[in-house]
Image (cartoon, helix red, strand yellow):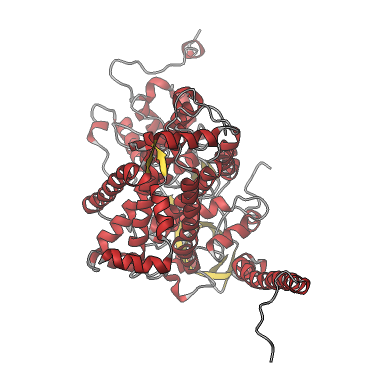
Amino acid sequence: MIRAAWGWLDQRLQVGATIHEAATHPVPSRTASWWYVFGSASMVLFALQVVTGICLALVYVPSADQAFQSLEHLNYEQPLGWYLRAMHGWGSNFMVAVVLLHMVQVVLFGAYKFPRELTWIVGVFLLLCTLGMAFTGQILRFDQDAYWGLGIGASIAGRTPVIGPQVVQVMLGGPIIAGETLTRFFALHVFVVPGALIGLLCVHLLMVIKLGINEWPMPGRLVRRKTYLAEYDALVHKDGVPFVPVAFTRDLVFGGAIVLAVMACAAYFGPFGPKGFPDPTIVDTLPRPDYFFLWLFSVASLLPPHLETPALLVGPVVGIGLLLALPFVAGEGEKSWRRRPMAVLTIVLVAVSFGTLTRLGTTAPWSPVMSAWSSAPVPAAQLQGRTALERQGALVLQAKQCRNCHELGDEGGRRGPALDDVAVRLTRDQLIRQVLQGGGNMPAYGNSLSPAETTALVAFLESCAPKGQKPARDSAEPVATSSR
Amino acid sequence: MPEDTPRDPDAPQSKERRSVLLTLGIALNAVAGALVAAPIVGYLLSAAKRERMLKSLDWVSLGALDTFPEGQTRMATFKNPTTHVWDGATATIPCWVRRTAADQFQVFAVNCAHLGCPVRWFPQSALFMCPCHGGAYYADGARASGPPHTGLFKYKYKIEGGQLWIVAGMMPTPGHYWTSNDAGRKPCA
């Protein structure tokens, strides 16, 4: 019955033969491996994003005055709205991660080499589309992070030489972040970027089928433009298996498992935000990017100021340029990662760098701790065994936001050095100079401290030395101040 | 009545007619494409027009002068000069107002000069601090520490009818309009 129906349909559609050919095309038998599942898993996750995204679009209101309320409605009133939001959010995280894994596998296995250069280049644009979806998606979750994230985007765009202000206006859809900004990002997130993604994905897939899946790299089996195609052809004929059902089974298992993983995360952790009403007058906020942009947050904090504009504007161009140039620089030769130490080292270096920057972004030691302690009582430990003057100094330290940037007794910011042993490092005169004049990334407090406050503060800091360690001293002082 | 005989596709007239039609077809589509593209590009780039940028700027009132005590820095809010009903809360923008004398003010954008996060005022230490990348500014808006290159963005202001007015309506980002407002930020220059 089903067979008859399909027969009727295919007589008119004429697609059966093409599908059959694509599904059963021979692939090298070694590629039936768990290493080859990340591409199809990315696609499965994208399909999940499309389905959950359409469901969310049924309810979400892309309007600056109501977007937040519609997200709250999805979270709390719409049946299963929270779950769909959670799946879409987790699906996005999984998709970025799996796309990156896919990319690492492709580099390690030399799959970007001849004749698959264009497959790689399209893949680079697919990565950019995926990141574009992640960023625009974060904006549609129209909360305080989204509002100030747009401000950060505008500040970066505004650094473009000559046409900076124009670029900002086109990005925001007007002179300032407002209603037109959100509708613009909505159009990007649901029409423009997914459209590009689907188109590129078709090209990517077509090339995978036409050119064949990259064979398992063997050390010493070199890629040569003249002979590769014939060698690959011989390989799949001698030692080939049909993609469906042999190689396909692992894709099937992994694809199913990854969807279950997304669903489990969504059920356990729930949806992301929205974090706070997007009212710009609420400046008591702590804007943070989503996980996959934390490294950028770290870069923006740690770069020396004079390098920042070139790095933010030229860096992405150079990075994307290098990715696009890769198959042209190394389009032939060894494919096996065992014989390509530079490729392995580059991946390790990039992964460690991005990992470290992401980790730093989660703790953000460069950010002053904004919940100042100026109204909280001074911790008792800082008062015990101290003179009246030193206690007065502890109060100054508490009230003047010193602890926004300095840690003392494991509490406080980490922008500046911890003060527990400051007396061992700086002499009295150096402490006074540092407090009044600042320097080394510390603001000068000369204008906001009275002489009495400075004296008290320095007296307190001089008492901040670990037990058994002598305070720093100026070795010239005894000579300079001696009566002889 | 014309005969229903098959045309010879290889006949010279057919070939010529086809080539004329092809040229005409390509030309027609090129013209149509250009005519469609022109308004689309114009529509997309309309936000960046200089006139629209300047039109979006206007004087707005921050309220009566006596709401800003001398020697203090306080937050004020204002409605963007041009808004849409669907702007919601984003239509209201905050700024920091510092009154240094009876008729002397400094009005700072809340957006950090580094990457635009909202800076917060701490009166005890007389510093503006940014929660994102660690920028800090002195009470007069000058850069104190951290990644910003310059001081806080300043609004142009005037006093009229007992009220404090500023020119607002544009995102404070590095660029001609805002940097020209910042004249005199280098006391040693």
Tell me if B106 is positioned left or right of B25 in this view. Answer: left
Q: Quadrant of residue A376?
A: top left
Q: Is B24 placed above or below A231 here?
A: below
A40 is higher (above) or lower (below) than B74: above
Question: In the orientation shown, which residue stands out farthest toward the bottom?
Answer: B1
Q: Nearer the viewer, residue A322 or B60?
A: A322
Q: Residue at x 22, y 35 (%)?
A: A380
Residue A349's x, y, as percent? Answer: 46, 29
A136 to B138, vertically: above or below: below
Which residue reaches farthest top? A484
Q: Position of residue A420 (x, y in %)?
A: 33, 27
Residue placed most toward the observer, A170 or A259: A259
Location of residue A186 in the rendering, given as x and y in whole percent from the top left corner: 45, 64
Residue B67 vertical placement versus A233 (above, below): below
Left or right: residue B187 compared with residue A216 = right
Q: Position of residue B139 (x, y in %)?
A: 50, 49
Quarter where residue B20 is shown: bottom right
Q: Is residue B170 left or right of residue A21?
A: right
Q: In this rendered view, identify the residue nearer to me: A315 or A473.
A: A315
- Name the quadrant of the N terminus of chain A: bottom left
- Residue A283 seen in the current view: no
Relative horizontal placement of residue A221, taking residue A46 as reference (left or right): right
